[in-house]
Image: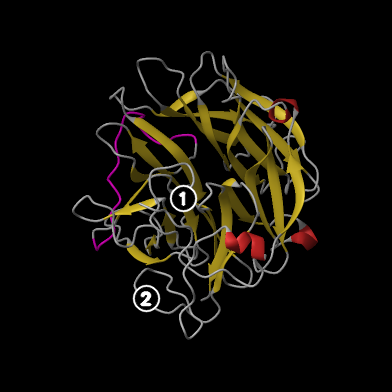
Amino acid sequence: MRRRTVTTALTAALTASAASALAAPALAEDGTHPADGTGRPGRPGDRPPRLLVDGTGLYPRAIRLAHQGEADDRLLASVVSFDGPSGYGAIWESVDGGETFAQVGTVSDEATAGGEGLCCATLYELPRAVGDLPAGTLLWSASVGADQPDRRMTIRIWASTDVGRTWERIAITAVAANAGGLWEPEFALADDDTLVLWYCDETDGERHSQKIVQQTSVDGLTWTDREDTIALADPAARPGMPNVRRLSTGDWAMSYEICGPSDHCRTFVRTARDPRNWGPVTARDEIIRAIDGTEPRHTPTLLVDDDGSVLLGAQMHYGPDGETSAANGQVVLRTRSRSLKGRVRWITEPAPVPVDEPWNNYCPNYSPTFVRTATGHLLEITSAPTDEGVCRPWYGSTGR
């Protein structure tokens, strides 16, 4: 089956060369675009998808700055990009609520520049000081070393104190003891100003194909030994892709997937009062399904919206029959439950950047990121492949 890219039209901002490499159907005759796969017109204020990078851009992340003084409400985005064999973090900025972006910085060190392999980055703004790192410090962390012949992967952290223009590596928090992977770092700051870092660990031999672990730090430079966060009893189960956000209630939420022969990368969410304690590490949570039976799978991500509702993105969507849904790649899930406790009702809504027929692959709609802008738009950045196989990041937004 031929795989296409986004289901909305290319905008005038795309160059002719970029447009010729992409397959996207035209806009409707009235100039709107079908945002949810149903043919329903887009809402006034919607911004159709545009390319963030005219080249490879993986694992997008976006944040709205809140601790930068005059730079508050700017959007910063990052993707993992490649120049030849070398990977680097590309930092992009929007000063107009996500209508346009410009690259303002890059993140790299001797390992990434040497082609050891770079993956799975995250972008975080410190809301308060941690050690000598002032409030507003930006952290970028990634998995490094996957492409080494006898790999010993690391989790590395870089910091920026000039709104993403320049970056310095401040820590290597973990080094793999064997060829197993260390993937997908994620940050949060506890109420006592302890920085918490989660990632996925494949180094536990036959006991766990993969588990989610955590480390903590009081200065961002030195880190505790890793501890299990979610490590299931089934050694073939693969909990991963942790995404942590603070709910409007003050509690914390973690979305994650469980892959493996019996779990099929289904999506789960659990909550905690303290981001260092998520309950029994072998516990299983309830599978997430929308009220219409839509089930999100693969690479879940969270947004706590400005009204306290919770949005859940995922790479793929399945129907009640276990087959991919007609809305696969077209929707996100939302709940009005601010606590994510008790009976939680998830409903679907149009994705700002619909991706046509995503499948289980590292590119199409993989780990989408969402942010509410100061202009009131819901912005999404996600990836989609060209017909030539280049994985490019797209951004777009829906109005109120």
Provide the residue designation for mark 1.
364
Q: In this view, does 165 lie to the left or right of 34?
A: right
- Amino acid at the residue labelled 2: Gly
Above or below for 273 versus 178: below
Q: Residue 288: where, in percent of width, then height? A: 30, 50
Q: Looking at the magenta stretch, what is its main secondary structure?
A: loop
| Residue ID at (73%, 45%) | 137
Task: Name which quarter of the figure residue 157 lies in.
Answer: top right
| Residue ID at (46%, 77%) | 42
Crowding near pointer 1: few (<14 within 10 Å), some, many (20+)? many
Q: Is residue 244 left or right of residue 218?
A: left
| Residue ID at (70%, 31%) | 219
Is residue 247 something one can see in this rendering?
no
Callout 2: SS:
loop
Display colour scheme: secondary structure
Callout 1: SS:
loop
Provide the residue designation for mark 2.
39
Crowding near pointer 2: few (<14 within 10 Å), some, many (20+)? few
Q: Is residue 3 left or right of residue 375?
A: left
Highlighted magenta segment, given as a residue range: 276-292
Residue 252 within the magenta-colored segment of the rendering: no
Q: Residue 343: where, in percent of width, then height? A: 26, 57
